[in-house]
Image: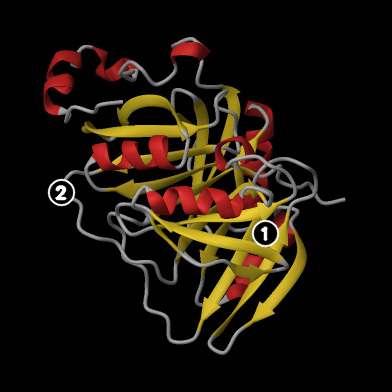
Amino acid sequence: MTKHMTGLHHVTAISGPPQANVDFFTKLMDQRLVKKTVNFDDPGTYHLYYGNRTADPGTILTFFPFVGAAPGRAGSGTASAYGYSIGASVLDHWAEEVRAKGARVSDPVERFGQSVVTVTDPDGAAVELIAEPGDHGPAEGGFHSTTLWLDDIGPTQRLLVDHMGYEEVGHEASGKGERLRLQAPGDARGTIVDLYREDGAARARQGAGSIHHVAFRALDDADQLDWRDRMIAAGMQVTPVIDRQYFNAIYFREPGGVLFEIATDPPGFTRDEPLESLGQSLKLPKKYEGMRNRIEQALPRIDT
């Protein structure tokens, strides 16, 4: 039996100035700011993490908020959307409340028998709310899915099905494209990956409002190393393990060009601050702690 992924660990995106990003996700989308740290490669830029109240894998959305970022563009060769699970009984009410607070909210559409509403974030990115049984909000439900926009679905489909244990569970065609739904076995959050293709689509452009990478879950270090061996055997060019403070990570480009990460569940976000005060203080990687005063002076102020 093919080993299968558990589901999504996190999604990382790029935004413009951080204050608008924090306001949107904490005040409109009811996410908790669970970690305020800096970009490992650019300590003059925040790395902000949002999630549910207990910062569980499968609920984590992170941003690099570059103050001067040019607008990005969704298109082929990127993860183009992420979707939160929301209770069907509260979707309409939730959408109306968010619209009343000034966000742009689409009318519902049906996708694979589920109602989908899209909320546009301050940088123009699509935040999908996908109805499932229950009365939970998006923070409690965590991720439902992510969408990969590809020129050719086939190679990515084969990687996910043959080597990562996903199963084909649906296909929908439209006049200009198609969407193939894959799902990992089990009842974890974020088990669905949609592969989307559109005739004549332009290539994606990275910038504010674009997704940087999609991260899948490894249960621990040993599981991650096993996945690394499996991805190398599948022909992927995989990085060594990299310590990201709250998880260990490996990265590779899947055949359609989307950056994939496999991240460990431990040690988690309570490694350097207690659960009740997550996200309240600026946390720095050890290599930057000696530069704290300079970094704090360079970072824009955020009102949380």
Instruction: Please tell me in which quadrant of the rendered image residue 49 appears.
Output: top left
Answer whether residue 145 is visible to the viewer in this image: no
Q: Is residue 53 left or right of residue 167?
A: left
Q: Position of residue 54 (x, y in %)?
A: 57, 23
Q: Is residue 63 above or below residue 71?
A: above
Q: Amino acid at mark 2?
A: Gly
Q: Classify 10 Å Cα crowding around label 2: few (below 14), some (14-19), many (20 and above).
A: few
Residue at horizontal 39%, vertical 21%?
279
Helix, strand or loop for disc 2:
loop
Q: Which residue is mark 2?
A: 68
User: Of 260 and 104, which appears nearest the observer?
Assistant: 104
Check residue 87 in the rendering and tell me which mark sits there, or answer none.
none
* Pair 1/2: label in front: 2
Residue shown at 39% from the left, 51% from the top: 100
- The picture places residue 252, in percent across and down from the top left corner, at 50, 51
For the question of whether residue 122 can be seen, the reply is yes
Give coordinates of residue 63: x percent, y percent. 36, 41
Q: Residues within 10 Å of mark 1 (few under 14, many from 20)?
A: many
Q: Quadrant of residue 137?
A: top right
Extreme residue toward the bottom, this view: 175
Q: In the current view of this chain or complex, which residue is farthest to the right?
A: 1
Residue at the disc numbered 1: 160
Reply above or below: 149 against 14.
below
Marks 1 and 2 sit apart, C-alpha to C-alpha, by 35 Å
Seen at 55% across and 25% down, the residue is: 53
